[in-house]
Amino acid sequence: MSSLRLLENAPLVSRNTLRVAARAELLAEVRGRAALDELLGYAGVRSGPLLVLGQGSNLLLAGDPQGLVVQLDLRGISILHEDADSALVRAEAGVGWNDFVHWTLGRRLEGLENLALIPGHVGAAPVQNIGAYGVEVGEFIATVEVFDRASGQMCRLDRAACGFAYRDSVFKREPERWIVLAVEFRLPRRHALRTDYAGIGEELSAMGIDAPRAAHVAEAVIRLRTRKLPDPAQIGNAGSFFKNPQVETAAAEALRAEHPQLPVYPAADPTQRKLSAAWMIQTCGWKGHRDGDAGISERHALVLVNHGHATGAQLLDLARRVAASVYQRFGVAIEPEPRIIGATW
């Protein structure tokens, strides 16, 4: 069933996981491909300010978004091709990400198990190049189907054209150009499981699993995330708010010599290392901090939380002060993961 619904002055407090009370000048709810075709016929979709909103789990509304806000309810998962080694799987943009991960595991397709329980929709996954526990989704994306507002045409971008980098992509660098409609994944039937990152091995041992399969790894990740990260259904948050900074190897070694407990990880660029933003933030004393309803989670120092009625501006102000203190103490700049609307970082 397809339908297109246009809402003026639409409240967004229930449409972003930080629960910020912003409003959209015009909100388009798109259900089904026929509704999408109808929407793409509107001039406002082809020019002017545009925000594509999924679950709003990687977003800080520091002000009301200008222009058109589009929420895509495009659902459906299908196997386009499969053989003995892998399958090419297509998922529409509105499919819940965690639902999709479990769909693939239920069909004995591997690769996404470390990304279980990440909030959001499939359409947001390539934008952020979501990652967790040593895996980034870009490794498994074959093609992204998009509407290109610059050309006014539908097109398909292969993995190379997506420009994936750490929490980055062409879609994030040009957020108003692209509308992600569907993602196709090349998923192996067997691959080397990644269990040596951030406690997965220890969790599997606690579960009594000696020879893990992909589903076991997903369960270990779910247990870790449930313990460490607050549930957006219980308290407003957007997951990890800060990216782990990447610095030159020499700078990382100098910092670790001064701070031996600082966790340092390999980076995709062999000349660089990734530093733990959470450790630096916690060392600066921010974990559990609260200014009114804006705060940092008591459970994880990377998570900015809304205890009730914090505005986006208040949350942004707190995040800026956290980053400034980390820079003052360690000389390292940390940056936000979520997209900030209505302000600049």
Image: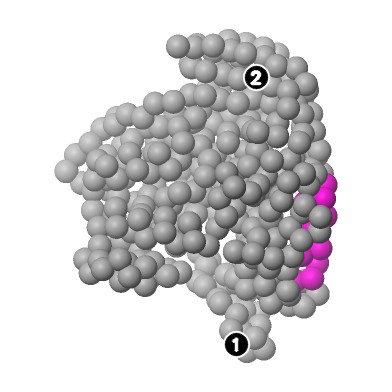
* Whether residue 163 is visible: no
- In the image, the segment drawn in magenta is 312-326
Q: Which mark is residue 260?
A: 1
Tell me the element at label 1: loop
User: Residue 212, image x and y in percent?
Assistant: 25, 62
Which quadrant would the N terminus be assigned to in this image? top left
254 is higher (above) or lower (below) than 134: below
Residue drawn at the location 58% of the way across and 84% of the way down: 261
User: Is 337 on the left-hand or right-hand side of 35?
Assistant: right
Q: Circle 1: is it few (<14), some (14-19), or many (20+) Cα within 10 Å?
A: few
Is 314 a magenta residue? yes
Task: Find numbered disc 2 in the image and state the secondary structure of the residue it sits on.
Answer: strand
Q: Earlier in the sequence, mark 1 or mark 2?
A: 2
The magenta stretch spans residue 147: no
Q: Nearer the viewer, residue 213 or 272?
A: 213
- Residue 282: name its quadrant: bottom right
Q: Position of residue 275 (x, y in %)?
A: 60, 72
Amino acid type assigned to the residue bearing label 2 in the image: Ala
- The dot on residue 28 is 2
Q: Residue at x 46, y 36 (%)?
A: 96
Q: Is residue 289 left or right of residue 208?
A: right
Residue 159 image label = none
